[in-house]
Image: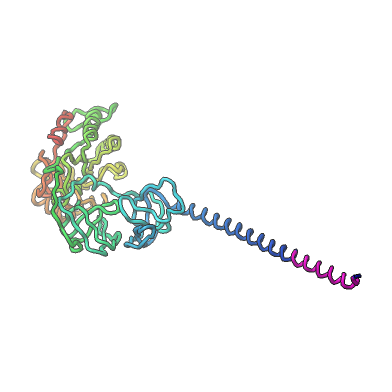
Amino acid sequence: MRIKPIRVLIIVTIFISVISLGCGIYVYNDMKEREKISLNVSKTKESLIKDEKLLIKIKSNYNSVVKTIKNTKLYINDNGKYIESGSINKDVVLELESIDKISLDNKYFKLLDSDYYVSYKDVTPTDNTINKRYLNYIEFPIEVTTKENIVYYDESFKELFTIKSSVTSKVIVNLDDYYGISLLSRLVYVKKEDVSNVVEIDSSEDMAESVPAILYHFIYLNGDIGCNDIICHSEEQIDSHFKFLADNDVFTLNTSEVLSFIKGEINLPKKSILITIDDGARAENFIPFLEKYGLNATLFLVSSWYPVSKFESSYLEIASHTHNMHTTGVCPTGQGGGINCLPESEILNDLKLSRETLNNTKAFCFPFYEYSDYSINLVKEAGFEMAFIGGSTKIKKGIDPYKIPRYPILSSFGVDYISNLVLG
């Protein structure tokens, strides 16, 4: 049977149309698949770039020490979920736990020696440090538990952070209205009214019943013109004394710690000492030895004699030895320091000027170790909270903080003398 040409044409046309449609569908699907792949590749690229930028940001915000950039939240990790557990103020310095290799999983940084975290977004690296001197103190045999949602303060009683849950800790500092405890790897203070429970605990730690304060005057380095006075010190003498203190892990105090010890606010280790230097002449020569051995000392400076900048060191505290009353023969008794007989207004002006010059120091030292009820009252009125004399006895809790004794060190005193004071 012959097929008519028209039928053949129709069949061919239908066949071609089906083939074309199939090809079109294939091409369309292929294009769509390619578009999808391309889109996925693009999204993957964008995601990788986004992750890379995020990782860079996390790394740039991480450091062993950071500072909060705003009032922010504290978190705890509950099975991988970070739950708000408190708040922390702006500009608070924090120490972080070390991270071997930072990844995208480190969006929250764990605070050192704690269970708390901060977001990487809320902190920035800082060169500031946290005062760790409290680690040398001997804890009180007291354990306290705080209430919930309590504010914790720094040493100036400025708010640091708030913790939602209660905290149990041993007491490091015991003030009239506050307990000092270790929290978030720092010494913080909590109001006693915010403590729900106080428990006495056993303690076997030895603590100092008394501590010595020693007094140096003038150090003469090798090559200097010699000094035969009994209060002149050779380089070898200072080096041997300071080396002994460092080798024996003696805690070298500052004046505020001495005052806290006298008040019974802190307990000190048995091996503790306050190093003092009087006047200011050649006092800068002590600094390399303090820094060499990592020891702290206090310079009682006659503030009109030398600029404070001459004695800049993180190891040297500057306190007052009057502004310009370290002169003999002004008063009729002893060596005649003017603080014992000059008019009240003249003495107060001198003392207040000295405090202002020396960053409002609270520590004072009487010239020539000479004092009276008259001078003590004026020292108090000028704003000083403590004053040092001579006396060659140790500092004990409860003594008069305006008659703190010291041991003058003479040029002939060797290491044995220091050893007997500290270890005897």
Give percent across and percent down for residue 23: 75, 63
Where residue 199 sits, quadrant-wise, is bottom left
For the residue pair 9 and 309, the one nearer the viewer reads as 9
Query: In this rendering, does residue 166 appear at all?
Result: yes
For the residue pair 316 and 335, the one nearer the viewer reads as 316
The structure residue drawn at horizontal position 40% and vertical position 51%, both measured from the top left corner, is 125
How is the protein colored in the picture?
rainbow
For the residue pair 167 and 406, the one nearer the viewer reads as 167
Give percent across and percent down for residue 177: 17, 60
**303 up-or-down from 241: above or below:** below
Give the residues drawn in magenta, as a range.
3-22
Magenta segment: does it hold 12? Answer: yes
Magenta segment: does it hold 180? Answer: no
Give percent across and percent down for residue 342: 13, 50
Q: Main secondary structure of the magenta part?
A: helix
Query: In this rendering, does residue 259 appear at all?
Result: no
**8 up-or-down from 45: above or below:** below
Q: Residue most toward the front?
A: 1
Circle count: 0
Give percent across and percent down for residue 131: 28, 49
The structure residue drawn at horizontal position 71% and vertical position 63%, both measured from the top left corner, is 26
Q: Quadrant of the N terminus?
A: bottom right
Q: Quadrant of the C terminus?
A: top left
For the residue pair 198 and 246, the one nearer the viewer reads as 198
Instruction: Answer with left or right where residue 257 lies relative to residue 11.
Output: left
The structure residue drawn at horizontal position 42% and vertical position 53%, both measured from the top left corner, is 106
Where residue 181 sits, quadrant-wise, is bottom left
